[in-house]
Image (tube, rainbow, N blue to C red):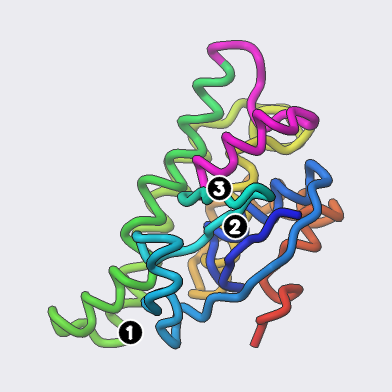
Amino acid sequence: MLTLYSYWRSTTSYRVRVALNLKGLPYETVPVDLVAGAQRASDYVTLNPGRGVPTLVLEDGSVLTQSLAILDYLDQIAPDPALLPTDALLRARVQAAAQTIALDIHPVNNLKVVSRLKSEYGLTGDDAIDWMRHWMSEGFRAYQALLPDGPAFSFADTPLLCDICLVAQLYNAHRWGVDMTSFARLLDIEKRALKLPAFDAARPENQPDAA
């Protein structure tokens, strides 16, 4: 069985949980408490030198890190349902939308960045929340502008890679009080996605380490 090292509130872990569920791949969850610093323990650093989550350990002991790499691997070994379309142009657009979340929003809002802004540069708790709200809003604005009219999800009537990234990031947006007034389309996508068992089971509050 696959083993997923995960933190319940990690949006990158959330992405992988959704993909595993969509593809019907059974896995065991091993919680990694990022707030307590479990990612810095020597045995975990040996497993994942980047000191982050998720980490996926395959049945043969091979280790994968970085959520987008893991999602690509899962799409290769379990291609149904596909996370990316076969049409080259549409595939590129889906990847661009996914990267808007994964590369533009997430890196400047993750725990280690925000913690350093507070400890080294004097941001208060309120400053940090404003920082996160700003970058999430900027990213959501760009994401929504990429979307065509019509599909139930971002680019199709079934969820793709970008929808997985979006729904995970929207969890953080709600958590930190981002004003979603301008993002009705994104909220509609989220509502549809969370009705699907694969997304519902992956919700942070449904994880074994949820506080």
Q: CA distance from mark 1 to mark 3?
A: 41 Å
Q: Give the number of the mark in front: 1 or 3.
A: 3
- Compare marks 3 and 2 and give the one earlier in the sequence: 3
- Looking at the image, which residue is at 61% across and 26% down? 148
Q: Which residue is mark 2?
A: 168
Q: Give the number of the mark in front: 1 or 2.
A: 2
Q: Which residue is mark 3?
A: 62
Is residue 129 among what the camera can see? yes
- Compare marks 1 and 3 and give the one earlier in the sequence: 3
Q: Quadrant of residue 142?
A: top left
- Looking at the image, which residue is at 30% across and 73% down? 114
Q: Position of residue 104 (x, y in %)?
A: 36, 47
Q: Which residue is mark 1?
A: 126
Q: Position of residue 173 (x, y in %)?
A: 52, 65
Q: CA distance from mark 3 to mark 2?
A: 26 Å
Secondary structure found at label 3: loop
The verdict on residue 82 being magenta is: yes
Q: Residues within 10 Å of mark 1 (few under 14, many from 20)?
A: few
Amino acid beneath label 3? Ser
Q: Which residues are magenta?
A: 67-89
